[in-house]
């Protein structure tokens, strides 16, 4: 379903807009409404983070979101239940979860993928799982028709990039820069060089989506103009939740998603 979404939008000369939110932030009741706002605004794929007490790939903005979610009572099980609720309302929108392997290990590999499948999860990013330890994980994901999305960074060697590509399905998640997630003011030359390098190596075998630091419509346009297939925007959406939780932030999120989606249209 994820690859089909990329193919469909590519035929329309549109990049794929992927929005990240932390499940349960600011509370469990609002997560489905936030998903509605984003999808109604034009988001093509929704990425939902399962709150984890040690989110090593995330910067301060998402760390605070994780704290809010955990204080609100978020658990892996109730976040998967919420995803099921979102999926029943938005059947055509692929949903990806972002998690850490401790959560999967504690629940049990088979049980985790079974629950994910039952709740309509289409893909999974496990931020701290190296491909050398992912054989059983990959097999279990395939049994449940869930794509395994792995991360590659500017520091990733060419040989390792080829291995990561073989283990990935749905899309390959390119980290735009060094460091953790967070809003950044501009796209670095390093990011452009990295995209060009990966594009040559992958050569169209799997869609490419770039995340970390993308927070403006102009960022979306610039990243897509280099030849990738999608962009992932997370911290900026999470910041809107953080700054507007007492106001009508849902409409603000919808409008921002719409603005980014318009920027993804390349024709």
Image (spheres, rainbow, N blue to C red):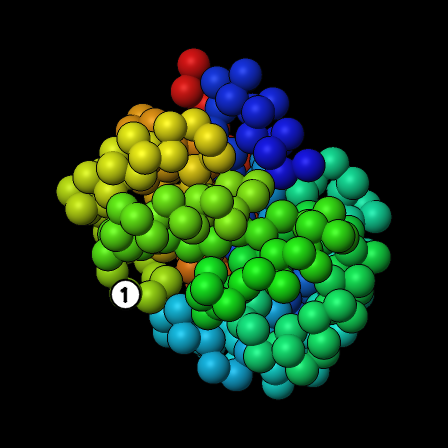
Quarter of the image containing the C terminus?
Answer: top left
Left or right of 65: which side holds 221?
left
Quadrant of the rendered image containing residue 181: bottom left
Give 108 or 232, whichever is nearer the viewer. 108
Q: Is residue 155 above or below residue 265?
A: below
Q: Which residue is mark 1?
A: 179
Residue 178 visible in the snapshot: yes
| 222 sits to left or right of 57 | left
- Residue 261, given in percent of the width and then of the height, sits at 50, 33
Residue 29 x %, y %: 74, 68
Rendered location of residue 173, percent (x, y): 44, 48
**What's the residue at 63%, 64% (across, down)?**
136
Residue 99 place in picture, x, y as percent: 56, 67
Q: Residue at x 62, y 38 (%)?
A: 2
Classed neighbour count for the residue bearing mark 1: other residues with Cα under 10 Å, few (<14), some (14–19), many (≥20): few
SS at badge 1: loop
Between residues 40 and 188, which one lies in front from this camera angle? 188
Residue occupying image coordinates x 28% and y 54%: 156
Residue 258 placement, left or right of 198: right
Q: Is residue 255 above or below residue 32?
A: above
- Give the image quarter of residue 184: bottom left
> Which residue is at the front of the view, 207 or 97?
207
């Amino acid at each position: 379903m994820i690859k089909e979404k990329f193919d469909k939008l590519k035929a329309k000369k549109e990049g794929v807009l992927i929005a990240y939110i932390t499940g349960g932030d600011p509370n469990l009741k609002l997560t489905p409404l936030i998903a509605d706002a984003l999808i109604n605004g034009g988001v093509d794929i929704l990425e939902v983070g399962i709150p984890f007490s040690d989110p090593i790939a995330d910067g301060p903005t998402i760390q605070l979101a994780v704290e809010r979610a955990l204080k609100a009572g978020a658990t892996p099980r109730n976040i998967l239940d919420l995803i099921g609720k979102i999926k029943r309302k938005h059947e055509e929108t692929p949903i990806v979860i972002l998690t850490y392997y401790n959560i999967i290990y504690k629940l049990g590999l088979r049980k985790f993928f079974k629950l994910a499948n039952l709740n309509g999860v289409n893909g999974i990013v496990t931020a701290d799982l190296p491909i050398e330890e992912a054989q059983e994980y990959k097999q279990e994901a395939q049994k449940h028709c869930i794509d395994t999305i792995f991360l590659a960074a500017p520091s990733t060697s060419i040989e390792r990039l080829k291995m990561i590509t073989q283990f990935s399905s749905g899309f390959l998640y390119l980290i735009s820069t060094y460091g953790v997630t967070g809003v950044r003011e501009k796209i670095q030359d390093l990011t452009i060089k990295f995209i060009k390098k990966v594009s040559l190596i992958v050569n169209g075998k799997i869609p490419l989506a770039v995340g970390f630091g993308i927070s403006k419509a102009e960022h979306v346009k610039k990243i897509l103009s280099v030849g990738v297939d999608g962009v992932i925007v997370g911290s900026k959406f999470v910041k809107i939740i953080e700054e507007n939780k007492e106001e009508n932030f849902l409409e603000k999120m919808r409008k921002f998603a719409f603005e980014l989606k318009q920027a993804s249209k390349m024709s």
